[in-house]
Amino acid sequence: MPGDINKQSEAKVGQGGRPVSNGGGMPFAERINIISTDEPWQWLARGWADLRRARWISILYGLIFVALGYAVTIGLYQLQLHHLIWPFATGFVLVAPVFAVGIYELSHRMQQGRPITLSDALMAWRRNPGRIFGAGLAMTFFLIMWIRSAALIYVLNFPYEMLTIQTLLNQTFFSQQGLVFLCVGTVIGAVFAVTAFLLSAVSLPMMVGEQADFLPAILVSVFAVARNPKAMLLWAVIIISVTALGMATAMIGLAVTLPLIGHATWHAYQALVRPPPSNPQ
């Protein structure tokens, strides 16, 4: 009977007793769990537990990218490209999922009860090099497009001017022209950020955890977000807030916040995506 079929469909549950999305014909719908808005906080708590277990391995890994951030900032300052410092800093969010591949590997190994080393994190890309490299190129493309867009917005709002950092801040926050610059840049940046989040919410952990192909991992990521909009919106806000906290400490805090979000993202993947039948975890 149609009613009975619908009830059976709604009764499907995944790992941990979570309901499985019927997906309405979406690709890979049978692999996507429906989660509550409480779960992102649980991912953060589990990420913190993993960070405490990994201790200095995760923090040293994070420090590598803090040093990279300082190198880029100093380089832009020396080249007097002050207007690109903030776009590069915010653009970090676009490529952070690729940087965090080593953190996913650490959580994966700890989940399996295996020992971990800094070398395991640094060599995590070797688990699925072609697909991870492809994801890295895609995220780098988004970063380049964002930087080019930010530079164009700057030129349109401040033509024929090369502003110092102090003058740029004054013009941005205390002039009508600057507020237009800020609003347009924020809207365009948000479009890039949302797109990157859709594509990378669980795709990189999938590539590490089950050596998933590039396109299936991307599709699962997009539909996992689409089927859990409230929970994933909360998760995006948590990611932005924790990352902003790391940025606010002159980027030094990213040595902790990047690994924390990386470990938590591994648990987000575990909660959202059911393992394939041929590759149980």
Image (spheres, grey):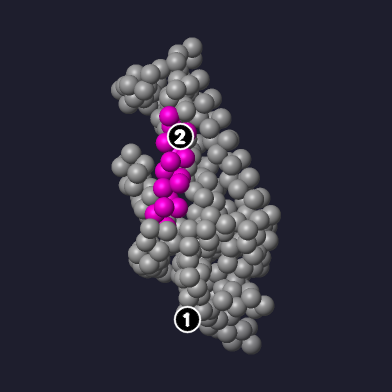
Magenta segment main secondary structure: helix
Identify the mark nearer the N-term, 1 or 2. Answer: 1
Residue 213: image location, x then y, percent: 68, 61
Residue 224 magenta: no
Q: Nearer the viewer, residue 128 or 143?
A: 128
Q: Amino acid at mark 1?
A: Gly
Please tell me which residue is depicted at 43% across the width and 25% down the height of the picture: 77
Q: Is residue 217 visible?
A: no
- Region rendered in magenta: 58-74
Residue 219: image location, x then y, percent: 63, 59
- Furthest toward the top, the residue is 160
Please tell me which residue is depicted at 63% across the width and 58% down the height of the picture: 126
SS at circle 1: helix
Picture quadrant where residue 69 is located: top left
Picture quadrant where residue 7 is located: bottom right
Please tell me which residue is depicted at 54% across the width and 35% down the height of the picture: 146
Q: Which residue is mark 2?
A: 71
Of the 4 image quadrants, the one containing the C terminus is bottom right
Picture quadrant where residue 211 is located: bottom right
Q: Classify 63 as above or below 91.
A: below
Residue 17: assigned label: 1
Q: Amino acid at mark 2?
A: Ala
Please tell me which residue is depicted at 38% across the width and 48% down the height of the picture: 254
Residue 236: image location, x then y, percent: 43, 54
Residue 64 magenta: yes
- In front: label 1 or label 2: 2
SS at circle 2: helix
